[in-house]
Protein backbone atom coordinates (compact mmCIF):
# COMPACT_ATOMS: atom_id res chain seq x y z
CA UNK A 1 0.00 0.00 0.00
CA UNK A 2 1.12 3.64 0.38
CA UNK A 3 3.53 2.93 3.27
CA UNK A 4 5.96 1.64 0.63
CA UNK A 5 5.93 5.11 -0.95
CA UNK A 6 7.04 6.93 2.22
CA UNK A 7 10.50 7.79 0.87
CA UNK A 8 9.03 9.16 -2.36
CA UNK A 9 6.43 11.18 -0.42
CA UNK A 10 9.11 12.72 1.82
CA UNK A 11 11.28 13.48 -1.22
CA UNK A 12 8.33 15.18 -2.92
CA UNK A 13 7.68 17.23 0.22
CA UNK A 14 11.26 18.49 0.11
CA UNK A 15 11.42 19.19 -3.65
CA UNK A 16 10.79 22.80 -4.65
CA UNK A 17 10.52 21.70 -8.28
CA UNK A 18 7.79 19.14 -7.56
CA UNK A 19 5.97 21.60 -5.31
CA UNK A 20 6.08 24.21 -8.07
CA UNK A 21 4.73 21.71 -10.58
CA UNK A 22 1.97 20.71 -8.16
CA UNK A 23 1.01 24.34 -7.62
CA UNK A 24 0.86 24.87 -11.37
CA UNK A 25 -1.39 21.86 -11.73
CA UNK A 26 -3.62 23.14 -8.94
CA UNK A 27 -3.82 26.61 -10.50
CA UNK A 28 -4.87 25.10 -13.82
CA UNK A 29 -7.59 23.05 -12.13
CA UNK A 30 -8.86 26.09 -10.21
CA UNK A 31 -8.83 28.30 -13.29
CA UNK A 32 -6.33 30.74 -11.79
CA UNK A 33 -4.39 33.03 -14.11
CA UNK A 34 -1.04 32.19 -12.53
CA UNK A 35 0.41 29.69 -10.11
CA UNK A 36 2.05 32.16 -7.74
CA UNK A 37 1.29 31.16 -4.15
CA UNK A 38 -0.70 31.58 -2.08
CA UNK A 39 -3.26 29.72 -4.24
CA UNK A 40 -6.71 30.53 -2.93
CA UNK A 41 -8.64 27.34 -2.04
CA UNK A 42 -5.83 25.31 -3.56
CA UNK A 43 -4.47 23.32 -0.61
CA UNK A 44 -6.11 20.00 -1.54
CA UNK A 45 -5.39 20.37 -5.26
CA UNK A 46 -1.73 21.15 -4.53
CA UNK A 47 -1.31 18.31 -2.04
CA UNK A 48 -3.07 15.70 -4.17
CA UNK A 49 -0.94 16.71 -7.17
CA UNK A 50 2.19 16.39 -5.01
CA UNK A 51 1.12 12.94 -3.75
CA UNK A 52 0.36 11.80 -7.29
CA UNK A 53 3.90 12.78 -8.31
CA UNK A 54 5.15 10.49 -5.52
CA UNK A 55 3.11 7.55 -6.83
CA UNK A 56 0.02 7.69 -4.59
CA UNK A 57 -2.93 6.39 -6.60
CA UNK A 58 -5.50 9.15 -6.05
CA UNK A 59 -7.22 11.57 -8.42
CA UNK A 60 -6.53 15.28 -8.27
CA UNK A 61 -8.87 16.42 -5.51
CA UNK A 62 -10.49 19.70 -4.49
CA UNK A 63 -11.46 20.43 -0.90
CA UNK A 64 -9.41 19.70 2.24
CA UNK A 65 -12.16 17.58 3.77
CA UNK A 66 -12.63 15.62 0.59
CA UNK A 67 -8.92 14.81 0.35
CA UNK A 68 -8.72 13.90 4.04
CA UNK A 69 -11.55 11.41 3.48
CA UNK A 70 -9.83 9.93 0.44
CA UNK A 71 -6.65 9.40 2.41
CA UNK A 72 -7.92 8.39 5.83
CA UNK A 73 -11.70 8.12 5.79
CA UNK A 74 -13.90 5.09 6.30
CA UNK A 75 -15.43 5.00 2.83
CA UNK A 76 -14.80 2.31 0.23
CA UNK A 77 -12.49 4.61 -1.77
CA UNK A 78 -10.27 5.54 1.20
CA UNK A 79 -6.52 4.81 1.12
CA UNK A 80 -6.87 3.85 4.81
CA UNK A 81 -4.06 6.07 6.09
CA UNK A 82 -3.65 5.92 9.88
CA UNK A 83 -4.76 8.82 12.04
CA UNK A 84 -1.85 10.15 14.13
CA UNK A 85 -2.12 12.41 17.15
CA UNK A 86 -0.70 15.91 17.25
CA UNK A 87 2.84 15.80 18.63
CA UNK A 88 3.55 12.39 17.09
CA UNK A 89 3.84 13.64 13.53
CA UNK A 90 6.84 12.94 11.31
CA UNK A 91 8.06 13.70 7.79
CA UNK A 92 5.67 12.32 5.18
CA UNK A 93 2.55 12.78 7.31
CA UNK A 94 -0.39 14.87 6.14
CA UNK A 95 -1.72 17.48 8.54
CA UNK A 96 -5.45 18.32 8.65
CA UNK A 97 -6.64 21.54 10.29
CA UNK A 98 -10.21 22.28 11.39
CA UNK A 99 -12.19 25.49 11.38
CA UNK A 100 -14.99 25.30 13.94
CA UNK A 101 -16.93 28.24 12.51
CA UNK A 102 -20.14 27.29 10.72
CA UNK A 103 -20.04 25.08 8.80
CA UNK A 104 -17.31 23.31 10.77
CA UNK A 105 -14.85 21.07 8.93
CA UNK A 106 -11.38 20.69 7.51
CA UNK A 107 -10.14 24.00 6.12
CA UNK A 108 -6.50 23.23 5.30
CA UNK A 109 -4.36 20.21 4.47
CA UNK A 110 -0.59 20.06 4.06
CA UNK A 111 2.40 17.70 3.84
CA UNK A 112 5.09 17.52 6.53
CA UNK A 113 8.56 17.85 5.01
CA UNK A 114 10.47 17.77 8.32
CA UNK A 115 9.62 17.51 12.00
CA UNK A 116 11.48 20.14 14.03
CA UNK A 117 9.90 19.31 17.39
CA UNK A 118 6.51 18.20 18.71
CA UNK A 119 4.97 21.48 17.53
CA UNK A 120 7.16 23.02 14.82
CA UNK A 121 7.50 21.57 11.31
CA UNK A 122 8.61 22.46 7.83
CA UNK A 123 5.69 21.83 5.51
CA UNK A 124 4.78 21.94 1.80
CA UNK A 125 1.43 23.36 0.76
CA UNK A 126 -0.27 25.93 -1.48
CA UNK A 127 0.80 28.92 0.61
CA UNK A 128 4.45 29.38 -0.37
CA UNK A 129 6.73 28.37 -3.24
CA UNK A 130 9.11 26.56 -0.86
CA UNK A 131 8.73 24.58 2.33
CA UNK A 132 8.05 26.83 5.32
CA UNK A 133 7.45 26.65 9.03
CA UNK A 134 4.07 25.81 10.52
CA UNK A 135 3.09 24.94 14.08
CA UNK A 136 0.69 22.15 14.94
CA UNK A 137 -0.69 24.32 17.72
CA UNK A 138 -1.57 26.93 15.14
CA UNK A 139 -0.18 30.10 16.70
CA UNK A 140 -1.35 32.66 14.11
CA UNK A 141 -3.02 29.97 11.96
CA UNK A 142 -5.69 27.30 12.45
CA UNK A 143 -4.44 24.54 14.74
CA UNK A 144 -3.92 21.05 13.34
CA UNK A 145 -6.60 18.57 14.39
CA UNK A 146 -4.78 15.36 13.44
CA UNK A 147 -2.26 13.86 11.05
CA UNK A 148 -2.59 11.06 8.52
CA UNK A 149 0.21 8.60 7.81
CA UNK A 150 0.55 6.08 4.95
CA UNK A 151 -0.49 2.69 6.28
CA UNK A 152 1.41 -0.55 6.60
CA UNK A 153 0.24 -3.19 4.10
CA UNK A 154 -1.15 -5.41 6.86
CA UNK A 155 -3.15 -2.54 8.36
CA UNK A 156 -4.56 -1.07 5.17
CA UNK A 157 -7.55 -2.45 3.43
CA UNK A 158 -6.75 -3.22 -0.18
CA UNK A 159 -8.37 -0.74 -2.54
CA UNK A 160 -11.38 -1.92 -4.46
CA UNK A 161 -10.61 -3.25 -7.88
CA UNK A 162 -11.85 -1.12 -10.74
CA UNK A 163 -15.09 -2.19 -12.41
CA UNK A 164 -14.36 -4.68 -15.14
CA UNK A 165 -13.97 -2.99 -18.50
CA UNK A 166 -14.07 -4.78 -21.82
CA UNK A 167 -10.48 -5.39 -22.82
CA UNK A 168 -9.43 -4.79 -26.42
CA UNK A 169 -8.12 -7.76 -28.36
CA UNK A 170 -5.54 -5.76 -30.29
CA UNK A 171 -3.34 -4.40 -27.51
CA UNK A 172 0.40 -5.03 -27.29
CA UNK A 173 1.15 -8.59 -26.20
CA UNK A 174 3.52 -7.40 -23.46
CA UNK A 175 0.69 -5.70 -21.52
CA UNK A 176 -0.95 -8.07 -18.98
CA UNK A 177 -4.75 -8.04 -18.83
CA UNK A 178 -4.87 -6.51 -15.34
CA UNK A 179 -2.51 -3.72 -16.37
CA UNK A 180 -4.64 -3.05 -19.46
CA UNK A 181 -7.71 -2.71 -17.25
CA UNK A 182 -5.90 -0.34 -14.91
CA UNK A 183 -4.66 1.87 -17.75
CA UNK A 184 -8.09 2.03 -19.38
CA UNK A 185 -9.62 3.02 -16.04
CA UNK A 186 -7.00 5.73 -15.44
CA UNK A 187 -7.66 7.20 -18.89
CA UNK A 188 -11.45 6.97 -18.69
CA UNK A 189 -11.56 8.81 -15.36
CA UNK A 190 -8.83 11.34 -16.09
CA UNK A 191 -9.42 15.06 -16.27
CA UNK A 192 -7.97 14.95 -19.77
CA UNK A 193 -10.95 12.86 -20.87
CA UNK A 194 -13.19 15.82 -20.01
CA UNK A 195 -10.97 18.61 -21.33
CA UNK A 196 -12.49 20.82 -24.06
CA UNK A 197 -9.66 21.37 -26.56
CA UNK A 198 -9.74 24.80 -28.26
CA UNK A 199 -11.45 24.58 -31.67
CA UNK A 200 -11.57 20.78 -31.37
CA UNK A 201 -13.86 19.97 -28.45
CA UNK A 202 -13.67 16.98 -26.14
CA UNK A 203 -11.54 14.15 -27.49
CA UNK A 204 -13.11 10.83 -28.49
CA UNK A 205 -12.99 8.49 -25.50
CA UNK A 206 -10.87 6.06 -27.49
CA UNK A 207 -8.23 8.67 -28.22
CA UNK A 208 -7.42 9.28 -24.56
CA UNK A 209 -7.47 5.55 -23.79
CA UNK A 210 -5.41 4.75 -26.86
CA UNK A 211 -2.75 7.35 -26.09
CA UNK A 212 -2.50 6.02 -22.53
CA UNK A 213 -1.97 2.47 -23.79
CA UNK A 214 0.48 3.65 -26.45
CA UNK A 215 2.53 5.42 -23.79
CA UNK A 216 2.38 2.29 -21.64
CA UNK A 217 3.99 0.32 -24.46
CA UNK A 218 6.62 3.02 -25.08
CA UNK A 219 7.49 3.18 -21.38
CA UNK A 220 7.72 -0.62 -21.19
CA UNK A 221 9.93 -0.68 -24.29
CA UNK A 222 12.16 2.02 -22.81
CA UNK A 223 12.61 -0.12 -19.70
CA UNK A 224 13.64 -2.96 -22.01
CA UNK A 225 16.21 -0.70 -23.73
CA UNK A 226 14.39 -0.77 -27.07
CA UNK A 227 16.32 1.44 -29.53
CA UNK A 228 13.28 3.38 -30.74
CA UNK A 229 12.03 4.11 -27.21
CA UNK A 230 15.52 5.09 -26.08
CA UNK A 231 15.72 7.58 -28.97
CA UNK A 232 12.34 9.02 -27.97
CA UNK A 233 13.46 9.39 -24.34
CA UNK A 234 16.80 11.03 -25.11
CA UNK A 235 17.45 14.40 -23.49
CA UNK A 236 16.83 17.52 -25.54
CA UNK A 237 20.14 19.20 -26.37
CA UNK A 238 19.25 22.48 -28.06
CA UNK A 239 18.58 21.13 -31.55
CA UNK A 240 15.39 23.09 -32.21
CA UNK A 241 15.86 22.74 -35.95
CA UNK A 242 14.85 19.05 -35.84
CA UNK A 243 13.68 18.24 -32.32
CA UNK A 244 10.19 19.32 -31.25
CA UNK A 245 11.11 19.07 -27.56
CA UNK A 246 13.77 21.74 -28.09
CA UNK A 247 11.44 23.79 -30.29
CA UNK A 248 8.85 23.74 -27.48
CA UNK A 249 11.48 24.31 -24.80
CA UNK A 250 9.96 27.54 -23.49
CA UNK A 251 6.48 26.09 -23.20
CA UNK A 252 7.74 22.98 -21.41
CA UNK A 253 9.81 25.10 -19.01
CA UNK A 254 6.80 27.28 -18.16
CA UNK A 255 4.92 24.14 -17.09
CA UNK A 256 7.80 22.76 -15.06
CA UNK A 257 8.46 19.90 -17.50
CA UNK A 258 12.21 19.37 -17.80
CA UNK A 259 13.62 17.46 -20.76
CA UNK A 260 17.34 17.87 -20.09
CA UNK A 261 17.92 14.27 -18.98
CA UNK A 262 17.51 10.92 -20.71
CA UNK A 263 14.66 8.90 -19.29
CA UNK A 264 11.03 8.45 -18.40
CA UNK A 265 10.20 12.12 -17.77
CA UNK A 266 11.39 13.17 -21.22
CA UNK A 267 9.52 10.25 -22.81
CA UNK A 268 6.33 11.18 -20.96
CA UNK A 269 6.58 14.83 -21.94
CA UNK A 270 7.03 13.79 -25.58
CA UNK A 271 3.70 11.96 -25.37
CA UNK A 272 2.10 15.03 -23.80
CA UNK A 273 3.10 17.02 -26.87
CA UNK A 274 2.06 14.17 -29.15
CA UNK A 275 -1.41 14.05 -27.58
CA UNK A 276 -1.87 17.76 -28.26
CA UNK A 277 -0.66 17.31 -31.83
CA UNK A 278 -3.17 14.54 -32.47
CA UNK A 279 -6.04 16.73 -31.32
CA UNK A 280 -4.83 19.59 -33.50
CA UNK A 281 -4.28 17.47 -36.62
CA UNK A 282 -7.23 15.05 -36.53
CA UNK A 283 -9.36 15.86 -33.45
CA UNK A 284 -8.27 12.44 -32.19
CA UNK A 285 -9.77 10.56 -35.16
CA UNK A 286 -7.68 7.51 -36.10
CA UNK A 287 -9.22 7.31 -39.59
CA UNK A 288 -8.68 10.90 -40.67
CA UNK A 289 -7.86 11.19 -44.37
CA UNK A 290 -5.75 13.83 -46.03
CA UNK A 291 -6.48 17.52 -45.64
CA UNK A 292 -8.65 18.27 -48.69
CA UNK A 293 -7.61 21.92 -48.62
CA UNK A 294 -3.96 20.95 -49.11
CA UNK A 295 -2.32 20.06 -52.43
CA UNK A 296 -0.50 16.99 -51.11
CA UNK A 297 -2.13 14.39 -53.36
CA UNK A 298 0.87 12.20 -54.26
CA UNK A 299 1.03 8.90 -52.44
CA UNK A 300 4.24 9.89 -50.64
CA UNK A 301 2.93 13.27 -49.44
CA UNK A 302 -0.78 12.57 -48.79
CA UNK A 303 -1.45 12.85 -45.06
CA UNK A 304 -3.17 10.09 -43.13
CA UNK A 305 -4.24 9.12 -39.63
CA UNK A 306 -4.15 10.62 -36.18
CA UNK A 307 -1.18 12.90 -36.76
CA UNK A 308 -1.62 13.52 -40.49
CA UNK A 309 1.78 12.02 -41.24
CA UNK A 310 2.87 11.11 -44.75
CA UNK A 311 5.24 8.51 -46.18
CA UNK A 312 8.00 11.03 -46.88
CA UNK A 313 8.43 11.48 -43.11
CA UNK A 314 10.34 8.18 -43.02
CA UNK A 315 13.01 9.35 -45.43
CA UNK A 316 16.37 7.73 -44.71
CA UNK A 317 15.76 7.18 -41.00
CA UNK A 318 16.84 3.65 -40.12
CA UNK A 319 14.68 3.55 -36.97
CA UNK A 320 11.60 4.76 -38.84
CA UNK A 321 12.10 2.19 -41.59
CA UNK A 322 12.45 -0.57 -39.03
CA UNK A 323 9.34 0.66 -37.24
CA UNK A 324 7.35 0.71 -40.47
CA UNK A 325 8.39 -2.84 -41.31
CA UNK A 326 7.62 -4.13 -37.80
CA UNK A 327 3.97 -3.03 -38.00
CA UNK A 328 3.20 -4.53 -41.43
CA UNK A 329 -0.38 -5.92 -41.50
CA UNK A 330 -0.93 -4.96 -37.84
CA UNK A 331 -4.12 -3.40 -36.46
CA UNK A 332 -2.73 -2.81 -32.97
CA UNK A 333 -4.95 -0.56 -30.80
CA UNK A 334 -7.51 -0.10 -33.60
CA UNK A 335 -10.50 -1.17 -31.49
CA UNK A 336 -9.42 1.19 -28.71
CA UNK A 337 -9.07 4.28 -30.92
CA UNK A 338 -12.37 3.49 -32.65
CA UNK A 339 -14.39 4.25 -29.50
CA UNK A 340 -16.35 7.47 -29.95
CA UNK A 341 -15.34 7.99 -33.60
CA UNK A 342 -17.89 8.08 -36.41
CA UNK A 343 -16.25 7.34 -39.74
CA UNK A 344 -17.14 9.77 -42.49
CA UNK A 345 -17.48 8.84 -46.18
CA UNK A 346 -14.07 8.96 -47.76
CA UNK A 347 -12.09 8.73 -44.50
CA UNK A 348 -10.45 5.48 -45.54
CA UNK A 349 -9.79 6.58 -49.10
CA UNK A 350 -6.10 6.63 -49.98
CA UNK A 351 -4.47 8.92 -52.52
CA UNK A 352 -1.83 8.65 -55.23
CA UNK A 353 -0.49 5.69 -57.15
CA UNK A 354 2.89 4.84 -55.66
CA UNK A 355 2.67 1.49 -53.86
CA UNK A 356 4.66 2.25 -50.70
CA UNK A 357 2.89 5.57 -50.14
CA UNK A 358 -0.54 3.92 -50.46
CA UNK A 359 0.47 1.17 -48.07
CA UNK A 360 1.68 3.80 -45.59
CA UNK A 361 -1.67 5.62 -45.68
CA UNK A 362 -3.53 2.37 -45.16
CA UNK A 363 -1.35 1.32 -42.22
CA UNK A 364 -1.56 4.76 -40.59
CA UNK A 365 -5.36 4.49 -40.42
CA UNK A 366 -5.72 0.78 -39.65
CA UNK A 367 -2.93 0.60 -37.04
CA UNK A 368 -3.05 3.58 -34.65
CA UNK A 369 -0.20 2.11 -32.59
CA UNK A 370 2.07 2.56 -35.60
CA UNK A 371 0.81 6.10 -36.20
CA UNK A 372 1.55 7.04 -32.59
CA UNK A 373 5.01 5.53 -32.40
CA UNK A 374 6.13 6.87 -35.78
CA UNK A 375 4.95 10.39 -34.94
CA UNK A 376 6.65 10.24 -31.52
CA UNK A 377 9.95 9.36 -33.17
CA UNK A 378 9.31 11.88 -35.93
CA UNK A 379 8.86 14.70 -33.43
CA UNK A 380 12.39 14.04 -32.20
CA UNK A 381 13.97 13.72 -35.66
CA UNK A 382 11.97 15.89 -38.07
CA UNK A 383 9.61 18.32 -36.34
CA UNK A 384 9.27 20.36 -39.59
CA UNK A 385 6.90 17.66 -40.87
CA UNK A 386 4.00 19.18 -38.90
CA UNK A 387 2.69 22.70 -39.38
CA UNK A 388 1.03 22.85 -35.93
CA UNK A 389 4.39 22.03 -34.38
CA UNK A 390 6.25 24.64 -36.42
CA UNK A 391 3.62 27.22 -35.41
CA UNK A 392 3.54 25.92 -31.84
CA UNK A 393 -0.21 25.33 -32.09
CA UNK A 394 -0.20 21.84 -30.54
CA UNK A 395 -1.22 22.35 -26.93
CA UNK A 396 0.64 21.03 -23.90
CA UNK A 397 -1.75 20.04 -21.11
CA UNK A 398 -0.77 19.37 -17.51
CA UNK A 399 -3.80 17.07 -17.29
CA UNK A 400 -2.12 14.85 -19.84
CA UNK A 401 1.16 14.77 -17.95
CA UNK A 402 -0.60 13.79 -14.74
CA UNK A 403 -2.59 11.05 -16.48
CA UNK A 404 0.55 9.59 -18.04
CA UNK A 405 2.38 9.84 -14.71
CA UNK A 406 -0.36 7.70 -13.17
CA UNK A 407 0.11 5.25 -16.04
CA UNK A 408 3.84 5.21 -15.38
CA UNK A 409 3.31 4.39 -11.70
CA UNK A 410 0.82 1.67 -12.64
CA UNK A 411 3.40 0.01 -14.89
CA UNK A 412 5.99 0.16 -12.10
CA UNK A 413 3.59 -1.45 -9.63
CA UNK A 414 2.73 -4.22 -12.08
CA UNK A 415 6.38 -5.26 -12.31
CA UNK A 416 7.18 -5.20 -8.59
Image: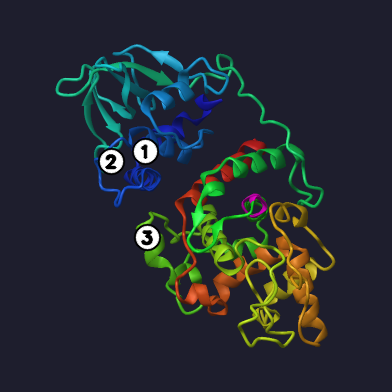
Instruction: Compare residues 155 and 312 and report the one nearer the observer.
Output: 312
| Secondary element at image label 2 | loop
Question: How far apart are the alpha carbons under marks 3 and 2?
Answer: 20 Å
Q: Determine which residue is flagged by label 2.
A: 39
- Location of residue 230 with respect to 31 vertically, above or below: below
Instruction: Compare residues 166 and 356 and report the one nearer the observer.
Output: 166
Instruction: Compare residues 219 and 261 and report the one nearer the observer.
Output: 219
Query: Which residue corresponds to the image point at 34% horizontal and 23% vertical from the top-left?
Result: 95
Check residue 253 in the rendering and tell me which mark sits there, or answer none: 3
Badge 2: residue crowd in 10 Å (few <14, some 14–19, many ≥20): many
* Percent position of residue 131, x then y: 26, 37
In which image quadrant can residue 411 be found?
top right
Query: Which residue corresponds to the image point at 33% horizontal and 33% vertical from the top-left?
Result: 43
Would residue 404 be visible to someone looking at this image?
no
Dots 1, 3 in contact, CB < 8 A = no
- Left or right, 65 with reference to 292: left
Badge 1: residue crowd in 10 Å (few <14, some 14–19, many ≥20): many
* Residue 14 lies in the magenta stretch: no
* Magenta segment: 205-210
| Secondary element at image label 3 | helix
**Outermost left residue:** 140
**First in sequence: mark 3 or mark 2?**
2
- Location of residue 29 with respect to 376 vertically, above or below: above
Dots 2, 1 in contact, CB < 8 A = yes
Q: Nearer the viewer, mark 2 or mark 1?
A: 2
Q: Determine which residue is flagged by label 1.
A: 46
Amino acid sequence: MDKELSKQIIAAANSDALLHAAQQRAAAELGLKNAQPPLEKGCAATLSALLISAGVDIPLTLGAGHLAQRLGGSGSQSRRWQRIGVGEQQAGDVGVTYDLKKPPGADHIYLVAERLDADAMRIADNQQAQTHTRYASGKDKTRTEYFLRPSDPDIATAPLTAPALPLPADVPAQLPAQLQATILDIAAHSELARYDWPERGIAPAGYIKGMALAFTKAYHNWQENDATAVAMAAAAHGNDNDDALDWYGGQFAALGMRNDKDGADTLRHLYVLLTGLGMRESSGRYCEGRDKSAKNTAASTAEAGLFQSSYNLIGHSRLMRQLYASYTNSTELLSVFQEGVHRRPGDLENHGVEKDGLAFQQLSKSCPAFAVELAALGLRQNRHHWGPINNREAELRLECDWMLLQVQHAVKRSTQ
